[in-house]
Image (cartoon, coloured by chain):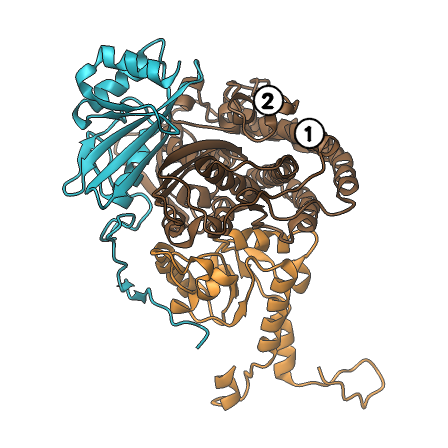
């Protein structure tokens, strides 16, 4: 937030977009979508040591109550159809973090006949976190990158090219 | 008063129509352990049957073995049961060594057993923690995760990875124990003892926990054997069988440990509480095994000389090893080339899922969660 | 009991159902004819000296060059702690064989998996349908001549190399 402090008391001046985005990024609730091995690392990221909840990301069970979907694990073709259904149920604005090699591009299961090579074939992805599985620190950095991305969004200026780029 | 087996009458007045409900549980659900789906046909709250629908994590691991070769398949075995990946590594290594006639050096065997038993502790921690969370208590879950982080640190010191290790090789293990490892592991085991007591005080003999689990989903010994239930699930029915003691492999014949069984102490023999209690007691046995290994470990190499392109003789082999979820049967068919012809893995969770349909008749829907948690099913073992 | 003794006892009881015995392999196995499979398995399960109460593993192997699919059963006995391997050969075209679900309930899901991935039809099975693949999948993936489809419900199965 830019601090142009011309008043000596406790007053901050900033843009409305940035305040809005600051409140939105500090409370990104993610849907529990642990599919495979990365799901265990997702649980440990939400666990006591690498606590992702201190950034405001609380786990939710239902897609209707969540802002973000972390695809943690291998997406099989049988599951890909259900993933699309779950993504459509999430209310706007929604974000997707693709966690792990399997969700990014199929990972080491590209040789398989029943695996969808990458979740971006089914739904649009905002942040890709590499690793097999990514460490909790890597996933936290992915979340912080998503927060940076959210700070760039513009809400008040309609039809602006900046919003289209976000 | 037990909550299960509660008889009550449904008053059906004239003109009241009732019909069976079909509910869908999963595949995305906070309580199913991974992507499992259950089609529950229920009459109100009582289930007529719960049909499992699996295959949402079928990653065709068995077919991939035919493309990557013997050595290249080791990372894929981690993903067969990622919660306790060391035992799966050992299964593949043992079956290849039996097929090709390779002998593992003694120090390598000890390293394997230490790694496997640490993996067993980590796996049971997650199982017990998620079971408590499914029943409703959030705190034991965070306690279990805290201890699991410590085990992850130990395994990371050993092989560099936290979850999918790729530590073992055909003919031994990849790296020796790092310096100072014995002290670290002993320090962990000493403070881990207090966690077992903490768990017993917090949940094992907690009145609510006992009421939720006692007399729920009783499986008799004959039924368990007919459905090929293995591991802690079979031991929970009172049948004392453990592959490490009865069909031993590696250096287990030289180690002294007991095989805990369910005793029906707070309910019927073979209910959910017995299966849970077996896992708590196995913490103690695994700690014993690790301490013995650390004191008995000899000097020497950890990896035997194995050709880079391994070509076992033509034929098939079958071995069983004791994984955290029961014994895993590994079947390997070799045609003399450097790629396996067929690999088949039969896991403990596969048999456990097949019994859910039968045992869930007459249970309440909330008890289905307790049943799945007590059977300790993970999705990748069922689907591979 | 050793595998040779088990084979002898089996041969005395149901001689014409048993085809051959291979004693020199790493795991000695008995080849059984498909038609008399259920009877043989029932005897192995019920007899007091044999007591094979556990079906430990059941796999199917596609021998493409010999034009057959072989189903391998690994049996284990908890009372006597001995084991045996049974093998049954079925042709690749129109492969059917009887189901042993009535003897061991564990065979229910194991046979469904073999049906799903290899296409062997088990007659007498209570609920033979696909287990691991989606219900509308075409083909049996573990066969050696299986060709991966180009797409499934609009999702393409091909991915360009990321190195380009």
Rounded to the nearest angstrom, the CA distance separating label 1 from label 2 is 19 Å
**Foreground residue among B79 and A140:** B79
Q: Is residue A69 above or below residue C7?
A: below
Q: Residue at x 29, y 35 (%)?
A: C111
Residue under pointer 1: B200
Check disc 2: other Cα within 10 Å, few if <14, some if 14-19, many if 20+.
Answer: some
Of the numbered discs 1 and 2, the one sitting upstream in the chain is 1
- Camera-near label (1 vs 2) is 2
In the image, taking residue B232 as reference, residue B255 lies left or right, namely: right
> For the image shown, how many numbered marks are present on the structure?
2
Please tell me whether mark 2 sits on a helix, a strand or a loop: loop
User: Which chain shows up in brown?
Assistant: B
Q: Is residue C76 above or below residue B313?
A: above
Q: Residue at x 39, y 29 (%)?
A: C26
Instruction: Evaluate whether label 1 is on the same chain as label 2.
Output: yes
Query: Residue B79: where, in percent of width, then height?
Result: 49, 49
Query: Residue C97: where, in percent of width, then height?
Result: 19, 32
User: Which chain shows up in orange?
Assistant: A
Residue with the most extreme left position: C94
**Foreground residue among C40 and B70:** B70
């Amino acid at each position: 937030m830019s601090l142009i402090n011309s008043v000596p008391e406790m007053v901050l001046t900033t843009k409305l977009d940035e305040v809005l985005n600051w409140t939105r990024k500090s409370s990104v609730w993610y849907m529990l979508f642990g599919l495979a091995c990365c799901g265990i690392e997702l649980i440990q990221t939400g666990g006591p040591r690498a606590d992702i909840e201190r950034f405001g990301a609380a786990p939710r069970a239902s897609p209707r109550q969540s802002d973000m979907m972390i695809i943690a694990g291998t997406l099989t073709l049988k599951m890909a159809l259900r993933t699309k259904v779950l993504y459509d149920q999430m209310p706007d604005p929604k974000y997707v973090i693709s966690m792990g090699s399997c969700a990014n591009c199929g990972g080491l299961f590209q040789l398989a006949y029943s695996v969808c090579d990458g979740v971006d074939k089914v739904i649009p992805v905002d942040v890709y976190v590499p690793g097999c599985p990514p460490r909790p620190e890597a996933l936290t950095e992915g979340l912080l990158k998503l927060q940076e991305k959210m700070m760039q969004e513009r809400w008040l200026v309609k039809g602006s090219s900046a919003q289209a780029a976000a | 008063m037990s909550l299960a087996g509660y008889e009550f009458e449904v008053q059906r007045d004239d003109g009241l129509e009732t019909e069976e409900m079909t509910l869908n549980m999963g595949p995305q659900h906070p309580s199913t352990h991974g992507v499992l789906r259950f089609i529950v046909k229920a009459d109100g709250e009582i289930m007529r049957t719960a049909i499992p629908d699996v295959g949402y994590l079928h990653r065709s691991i068995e077919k991939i073995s035919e493309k990557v070769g013997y050595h290249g398949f080791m990372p894929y075995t981690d993903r067969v049961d990622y919660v306790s990946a060391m035992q799966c590594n050992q299964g593949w290594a043992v079956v290849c060594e039996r097929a090709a006639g390779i002998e593992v050096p003694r120090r390598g065997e000890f390293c394997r057993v230490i790694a496997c038993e640490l993996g067993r502790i980590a796996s049971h921690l997650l199982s017990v923690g998620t079971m408590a969370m499914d029943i409703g208590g959030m705190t034991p879950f965070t306690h279990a995760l805290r201890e699991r982080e410590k085990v992850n640190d130990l395994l990371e010191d050993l092989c560099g990875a936290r979850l999918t290790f790729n530590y073992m090789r055909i003919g031994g293990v990849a790296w020796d124990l790092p310096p100072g490892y014995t002290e670290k592991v002993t320090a962990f085991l000493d403070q881990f003892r207090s966690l077992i007591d903490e768990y017993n005080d917090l949940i094992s003999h907690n009145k609510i926990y006992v009421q939720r689990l006692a007399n729920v989903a009783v499986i008799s010994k004959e039924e368990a054997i007919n459905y090929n239930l293995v591991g802690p699930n079979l031991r929970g029915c009172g049948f004392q069988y453990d592959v490490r003691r009865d069909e031993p492999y590696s250096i287990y014949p030289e180690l002294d440990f007991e095989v805990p069984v369910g005793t029906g102490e707070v309910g019927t023999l073979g209910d959910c509480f017995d299966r849970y209690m077996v896992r708590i007691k196995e913490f103690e046995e695994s700690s014993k095994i690790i301490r013995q290994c650390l004191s008995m470990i000899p000097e020497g190499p950890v990896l035997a000389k194995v050709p880079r392109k391994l070509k076992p003789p033509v034929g098939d082999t079958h071995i069983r090893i004791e994984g955290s979820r029961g014994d895993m049967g590994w079947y390997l068919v070799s045609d003399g080339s450097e790629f396996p012809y067929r690999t088949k893995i039969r896991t403990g969770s596969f048999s456990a899922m097949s019994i859910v349909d039968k045992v869930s008749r007459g249970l309440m829907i909330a008890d289905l969660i307790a049943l799945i948690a007590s059977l300790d099913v993970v999705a990748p073992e069922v689907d591979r | 009991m050793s595998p040779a003794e088990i084979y002898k006892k089996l041969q005395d009881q149901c001689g014409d159902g048993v085809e051959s015995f291979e004693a020199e392999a790493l795991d000695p196995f008995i080849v059984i004819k498909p038609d008399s499979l259920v009877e043989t398995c029932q005897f192995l399960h019920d007899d007091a000296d044999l007591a094979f109460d556990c079906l430990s593993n059941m796999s199917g192997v596609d021998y493409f060059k010999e034009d057959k699919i072989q189903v391998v059963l690994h049996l284990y006995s908890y009372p006597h702690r001995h084991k045996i391997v049974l093998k049954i050969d079925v042709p690749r075209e129109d492969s059917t064989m009887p189901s042993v679900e009535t003897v061991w309930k564990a065979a229910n899901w194991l046979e469904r998996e073999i049906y799903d991935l290899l296409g062997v039809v088990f007659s007498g099975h209570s609920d033979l349908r696909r287990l691991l693949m989606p219900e509308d999948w075409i083909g049996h993936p573990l066969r050696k001549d299986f060709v991966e489809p180009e797409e499934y419900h609009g999702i393409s199965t091909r991915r360009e190399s990321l190195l380009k």
